[in-house]
Image (tube, helix red, strand yellow):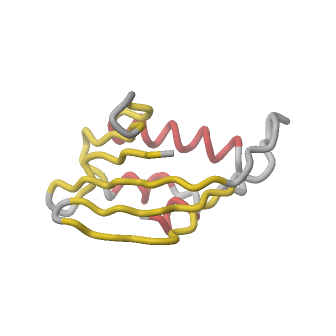
Amino acid sequence: MITAYNAQDVDTYVSYMTDDACEANYRGAVVREGKEGTRSGLAAAFAKWPQNRAEIRERQAIGDYVLFREYVTRGPATDGSELVEPFEVIAIYSFEGDKVARVEFLR
């Protein structure tokens, strides 16, 4: 999934998700709803930051959860907006069977 993310291959990325999966802030608002919302949201982000990448610094599996500590770099934005400094995020992937049902980001 991270390989697809770094290749900016949104179709492969969402293929690992349940149809009603979402991405959200930790214990907060959903930022991308369902496969289609995730696909369109990531496509827009990748269009804005074509150099965007996530490096997995640590990983841990606990039951139906996988936790990644990611180091994210965006690079210059295509819309000329201010450069986003690299940042770390904890991503918590919740699974239903072999598909991701929810991803929550703690930043």
Along the horizontal axis of the image, is 16 left or right of 96? right
Q: Residue furthest top?
A: 29
Q: In which quarter of the image is residue 32?
A: top left
x and y percentages locating residue 64 in the rendered image:
18, 60
Q: Quadrant of residue 51?
A: bottom right
x and y percentages locating residue 14 in the rendered image:
38, 52
Please, is residue 94 above or below residue 37 in the view? below
Along the horizontal axis of the image, is 55 left or right of 94? right
Please, is residue 103 above or below residue 67 in the view? above
Residue in the picture at 66% in, 55% down: 52
x and y percentages locating residue 57 in the rendered image:
52, 71
Along the horizontal axis of the image, is 76 left or right of 29? right
Q: Quadrant of the N terminus?
A: bottom left
Residue in the picture at 24% in, 57% down: 99
Residue in the picture at 80% in, 43% down: 83
Number of marks present in the image shown: 0
x and y percentages locating residue 21 in the rendered image:
28, 42
Q: Which of 99 and 15 is in front in this view?
A: 99
Q: Nearer the viewer, residue 55 or 3?
A: 55
Along the horizontal axis of the image, is 104 left or right of 75? left
Q: Which residue lies furthest to the right in this view?
A: 80
Residue in the picture at 30% in, 63% down: 66
Q: Quadrant of residue 95?
A: bottom left
